[in-house]
Image: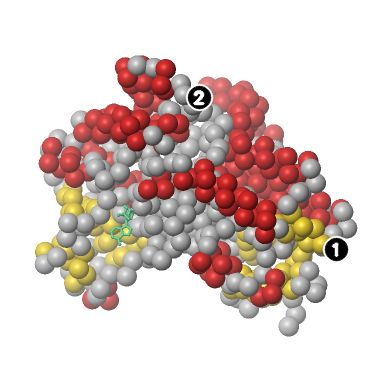
Amino acid sequence: MSSEQFDALVVGAGISGLYQTYKLREAGFSVRAIESAPDVGGTWYWNAYPGCRVDSPANIYQYWFSQALLDDWDWSERFPAQPEIKRYLQHVARRFDLYSAIEFETRVASAEWLEEQAQWRVVTDTGKTFTARYLVSCVGLLSTPKVLSIPDQETFQGRVYYTARWPQQPVDLNGQRVGVIGNGATGIQVIQTLAPEVSELTVFQRTPQYAVRMKNYKVDKHIMSDWRADYPHISKLVHTTFGGFTWDPAEEGHAATLTPEQRNDVYEECWADGSLKMFVGTFPETLVDPVMNAELTEFVRNKIRVQINDPVLANKLIPSDHGYGLKRVPLESGYYEAFNRPNVQLVDVKAEPISGFYEGGLRVGDKEYPLDVLIMATGFDAGTGTLSRMGVRGRGGQSLAALWGRDIRTTLGLQVHGFPNLFLIGGPLSPSAAFCNVQTCVQQQIDWVTEAISHVRESGHRSMEPTLEREEEWVRHHDEVANATLMVTVDSWYTGANIQGKQRRLLSYIGGAHVYRELCEEIQQQGYPGFKLTR
Ligand code: NA7
């Protein structure tokens, strides 16, 4: 079988894949990226649903590697909508001539490590075969949608859309009767956007969410110029903070030195920022101490309650089964207020589950809800979902899917024992898997991986792989930090609980992005202890 040979293959052409392709090429490697979509963007390509918007400020949700790029790209809003992020990524791909390095509309069907040759052989669903010494996964954390199997879907005469596979052409929902399943960050954006546009909106809610009011604003040329002047500072700052943002939570222990009123002032200040500062910028104790968590939860409940006219409805929309901040906190712009509208109704599908479709809509228990369109905002098989479906086989033919089916383990989220020269960006058990502004943390990992690959080549080795001991040490440390938090007690995509049968483990390292970066740097400076290099 003929195959195309490269030094490195990158899987994915989203935020990570584009930068990884650029970096490897700059380091002198021949590189091919494989992307299932017809264009760049990854998550920002597929999630073209109404209201999709980034919830990290644009001035940190960007690449730092090129001054020219920073100089010539202007943002239009503090939290830009999906089309703008996609345009930015397309601009980057054009500006750095990355399109020519990408194989579009192509999926990896299998990836097999060939021990003798020290090469990865990758076969695609288009029938092509590639071989490369290095394989870098940039498949994204939220790329495999969670698909629901609802009885009798074939009988439904209306349309069904998944937000994570939204059509690229506009979908006209004007005047339609629309249903939404899912109240995570995605469902919230869809609901608040469609409520004023559609004739009837029926929200099938299983679990309510705490969401924080987003403070978005237009970025005019003055703001843009202030941002730009601050870029040198921001680009350094984001690498020194807990979550890769420009803010940090208070010092540990500080909360206990304050009165409840003073702590309330801190909550107010974070709330007023209208950003994820309200998630990662208060007190670290709120994530580990039930009493502190209850205090913050009460604050947020009160903020939400005043937005909902009907107190009975408010009780349904405000979570009571878990504390604030123990799941990913979405930002909202009129989500709760949407339920004050006469054309929006909430259906509790926990009290009575969805029983199935019928010709004209969805049935919950015996009750029928007529629909023209049903939108599924049901989340993702996060972190492991895409890689587990890629047919990855490492040393001795062992399957990554089978390994992760038993035990989701990695070494710093960067490599997996038994899988030489497979590098992961945004891999499980790293901060970038969930607890870091993605742009900050994937760039740090890509820089690390590029250095590591260059080191393998320059030191005359053929492969690099973490030792079992190093991996076990990392998994132990990860679990120890994770199990000290209240997050592990809650069902969410963070803990893998949203996917039936998935191993329960906090998906992302929560010891701090800054701590992780220092550790990665130390490993590099010390010549990769705990990683085995083979000639
Ligand atoms: P999430 O946060 O995983 O939310 C998925 C939503 O879908 C959530 O409300 C789920 O309710 C709901 N869901 C999932 N399966 C079902 C079934 N079977 N029946 C009813 N409802 C269901 O995904 P998002 O896409 O919103 O957000 C993912 C991340 O993207 C977000 O955290 C940001 O980082 C960006 P449940 O809670 O399971 O009861």
Amino acid type indicated by mark 2:
Glu
> Which mark is on residue 535?
1
Q: Where is residue 287 in the image (x, y as percent from the top left)?
A: 41, 36
Examine the image and state in which quarter residue 403 appears: bottom right
Along the horizontal axis of the image, is 338 left or right of 472? Answer: left
Looking at the image, is 40 positioned above or below residue 282? below
> Which mark is on residue 251?
2
Along the horizontal axis of the image, is 253 left or right of 1? Answer: left
Looking at the image, is 70 positioned above or below residue 122? above
Q: Earlier in the sequence, mark 2 or mark 1?
A: 2
Looking at the image, is 472 positioned above or below residue 278? below
From this viewpoint, is residue 467 visible? Answer: yes
Distance from Cα at disc 2 to Cα at disc 1: 46 Å
Looking at the image, is 172 positioned above or below residue 62? below
Examine the image and state in which quarter residue 226 appears: top right
Examine the image and state in which quarter residue 177 appears: bottom left
Q: Nearer the viewer, residue 54 or 385?
A: 385
